[in-house]
């Protein structure tokens, strides 16, 4: 089965599973059909999928991971003992766990083609991730508290696990309070403690609460680095601060060096 045929099969399966969607006719090419597939995956609720669908979805996502290129931990130089900084797509990192900046529902971003990291991670990991998160949240019975963390398999990502944490949301018109700063620190602490409990050795952190949640970049980086350094004082770990923008890379390199 060529790629276009595979993607069209996945699209048809999801459309059958979500009756009532109105989809305008798209060009019969890989780019347009793949964009539709990501959008459908984004809005698809937790559900059971048959073996063929999951096998073909995993086949496609595995090929795409290889095409993006896997970045191994040893490929990233240390900035100092136990700390690395890397700018790029977190879904390429082959570490024990990557950190997802989730929302309180913990099911991923349902906005089609949204640019947040939650959407990117769920889109690359596959629909099994939403199902795994749904099992956790159904058993929990309430929204995920800010500052806590949960762990799931990473499914089709190069990492082994995903640590999901909910950071504080800061109104864009004001600075974060001390309580909100403490909640952000708790996100890092919760992820690190959960990773240590699972005997993981390497964790890649995204810039939690910045971007969509409006936490100021520099203050967020100061809290992240301080919390991680305190943890490394008593634990042997490899930490990657994963950034997506050059300005954030500059901030992290300045702060880690101080």
Image: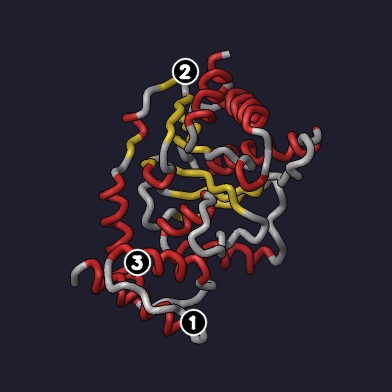
For marks 3 and 2, give the one nearer the viewer.
Answer: 3
Report the front residue among 94 and 1. Answer: 1
Alpha carbons under labels 1 and 3: distance apart:
16 Å
Report the front residue among 3 and 183. Answer: 3
Alpha carbons under labels 1 and 2: distance apart:
53 Å
For marks 1 and 2, give the one nearer the viewer.
Answer: 1
Q: Which mark is residue 6?
A: none
Q: Which residue is mark 2?
A: 80
Q: Are marks 1 and 3 in contact (CB under 8 Å)?
A: no
Residue 40 sits in quarter: bottom left
Where is residue 165 shown, x and y percent of the image? Answer: 61, 48
Quadrant holding the C terminus: top right
- Determine the residue positioned at 50% across, 65% down: 42
On screen, residue 251 above or below 64: above
Where is residue 244 shown, x and y percent of the image? Answer: 48, 37
Q: Sequence-wise, which precedes: disc 1 or disc 2?
A: 1
- Determine the residue positioned at 80% across, 37% down: 179
Where is residue 149 shown, x and y percent of the image? Answer: 62, 48
Q: Which residue is mark 1?
A: 22
Report the front residue among 250 and 158. Answer: 250
- Determine the residue positioned at 37% across, 44% down: 92
Structural crowding at the residue carrying mark 3, measured as other residues with C-alpha within 10 Å and reported as few (<14), some (14–19) or many (≥20)? few
**Residue reaching furthest to the top:** 258
Q: Which residue is mark 3?
A: 32
Structural crowding at the residue carrying mark 2, measured as other residues with C-alpha within 10 Å and reported as few (<14), some (14–19) or many (≥20)? few
Structural crowding at the residue carrying mark 1, measured as other residues with C-alpha within 10 Å and reported as few (<14), some (14–19) or many (≥20)? few
- Determine the residue positioned at 57% across, 38% down: 207
**Residue reaching furthest to the left:** 1
């Amino acid at each position: 089965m060529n790629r276009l045929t595979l993607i069209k099969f996945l699209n048809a399966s999801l459309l059958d599973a979500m009756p009532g969607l109105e989809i305008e006719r798209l060009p019969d090419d890989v780019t347009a059909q793949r964009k539709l597939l990501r959008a459908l995956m984004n809005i698809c609720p937790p559900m059971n999928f048959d073996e063929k669908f999951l096998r073909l979805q995993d086949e496609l996502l595995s090929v795409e991971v290889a095409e993006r290129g896997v970045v191994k931990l040893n490929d990233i130089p240390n900035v100092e003992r136990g700390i690395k900084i890397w700018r790029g797509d977190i879904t390429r990192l082959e570490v024990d766990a990557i950190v997802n900046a989730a929302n309180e529902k913990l099911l991923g971003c349902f906005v089609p083609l949204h640019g947040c990291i939650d959407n990117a991670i769920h889109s690359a990991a596959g629909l099994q991730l939403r199902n795994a998160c749904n099992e956790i949240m159904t058993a929990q019975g309430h929204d995920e508290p800010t500052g806590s963390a949960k762990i799931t398999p990473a499914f089709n990502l190069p990492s082994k696990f995903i640590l999901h944490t909910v950071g504080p949301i800061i109104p864009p018109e004001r600075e974060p309070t001390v309580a909100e700063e403490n909640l952000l620190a708790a996100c890092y602490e919760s992820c690190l403690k959960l990773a240590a409990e699972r005997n993981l050795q390497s964790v890649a952190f995204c810039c939690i609460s910045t971007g969509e949640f409006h936490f100021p970049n520099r203050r967020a980086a100061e809290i992240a680095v301080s919390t991680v350094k305190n943890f490394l004082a008593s634990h042997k770990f490899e930490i990657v601060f994963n950034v997506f923008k050059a300005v954030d890379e500059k901030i992290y390199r300045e702060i880690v060096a101080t």
